[in-house]
Image: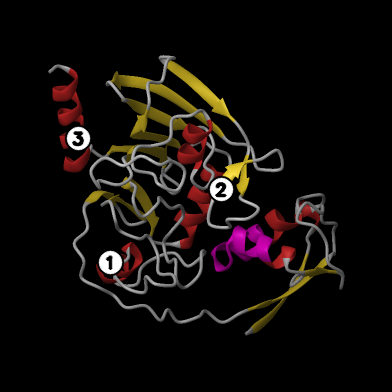
Amino acid sequence: MERIELVIPVEYEDVRLDKSVSELMGEKLSRSSIQKMIKNGELTVNGKTEKTSYQVKTDDVIAFTLKDPVELDLKAENIPLSVLYEDDDLLIIDKPKGMVVHPAAGHAEGTLVNALAYYCKGKLSGINGVLRPGIVHRIDKDTSGSLVVCKNDTAHQGLAEQFQVHSITRRYYCICCGNVKEDEGTINKPIGRHSVERKKMCITENGRRAVTHYKVLERFEKYTFLECSLETGRTHQIRVHLASIGHPILGDLVYGKQDYKGMGQILHAGVLGFKHPVTGEWIEVTSELPPYFQELLEKLRRELHK
């Protein structure tokens, strides 16, 4: 461990605490890590704790301990990956349905992170901890489609900031239960953790702002094929929002009741677009609908036209 003391120079007068420390530390420490230290009271200003938004003054003394990096105790596994895009800073994976993103209780192996540890040979960002290297966002186990992974902390921090301000393009495709009457619409309802069932999310006045835009692509007798665009990115957002208007995703037995012959949740992350965090170039990829999704669409079309 290394004890760090920074003295604020005059040119940083009235700059936010997290921003000033981030810039003074350079690539040695990410801004999200600094914010976490401030929140946990591990960083002091002139011997006292301050809020992240505190505006530093010339000659303020910022002190904290830089912890030694933790070695990742993670099994690298040679699991085939479908790569939609890759460069020196990041890659975009086409995640299959049924694959868990990172290790957790009951899923120590066979996750996307296990596969990435082998594929990237350890060259992954470390901002989200030793069990989530490279992971800047997630999609559910039973959701398929595009997911971006960062190879270094610079790329991770740049993308995390874009996720935070909701400037990233994310379009999902799903089949929901029932006939959605409007051709398009917007669901603007705050989402928070369920008060009793802690693994579930729910619509709640005390939740965080959540906005989903949807467009009907095709209608069937009992189901609707939708494109959903995320303005925000809350946990289970599309699943919770569609359930809240009476059209839960087909196969989502957490927020709905109806499955289609054991196929499970029909939700796919189709389009992902963002400004490259290093080069500034706009990157946009499309993950084609997987076979299980296309086969179900064809089956529903045949049933509709019998």
Q: Which mark is residue 115?
A: 1
Considering the image in quadrants, where does the C terminus appear? top left
Q: On the image, which quarter does residue 79 sit in?
A: bottom left
Alpha-carbon neighbours of circle 2 within 10 Å: few (<14), some, or many (≥20)? Answer: many
Residue lying at the far bottom in this picture: please name it. Answer: 1
The answer to whether residue 178 is left or right of residue 213 is left
> The residue under label 2 is which amino acid type?
Met
Q: In this orientation, does residue 155 appear?
A: yes
Measured Cα–Cα span from mark 1 to mark 2: 29 Å
Taking the spot 65% from the left edge, 42% from the top edge, the residue there is 208
Q: Which mark is residue 183?
A: none
According to the picture, the residue beneath numbered tag 3 turns out to be 296
x and y percentages locating residue 148 in the rendered image = 37, 50
Taking the spot 48% from the left edge, 26% from the top edge, the residue there is 213
Q: Magenta segment, principal secondary structure?
A: helix
Q: On the image, which quarter does residue 187 sit in?
A: top right
x and y percentages locating residue 276 in the rendered image = 41, 44
Measured Cα–Cα span from mark 1 to mark 3: 29 Å
The stretch of residues the image draws in magenta is 22-36
Residue 227 is a magenta residue: no
Q: Are marks 1 and 2 in contact (CB under 8 Å)?
A: no
According to the picture, the residue beneath numbered tag 2 turns out to be 201
The residue tagged with tag 1: helix, strand or loop? helix
How many marks on residues? 3
Q: Earlier in the sequence, mark 3 or mark 2?
A: 2
Q: On the image, which quarter does residue 221 sit in?
A: top left
The residue tagged with tag 2: helix, strand or loop? strand
> The residue under label 1 is which amino acid type?
Ala
Compared to residue 51, the image places residue 211 above or below, namely above
> The residue under label 3 is which amino acid type?
Leu
x and y percentages locating residue 156 in the rendered image = 47, 56
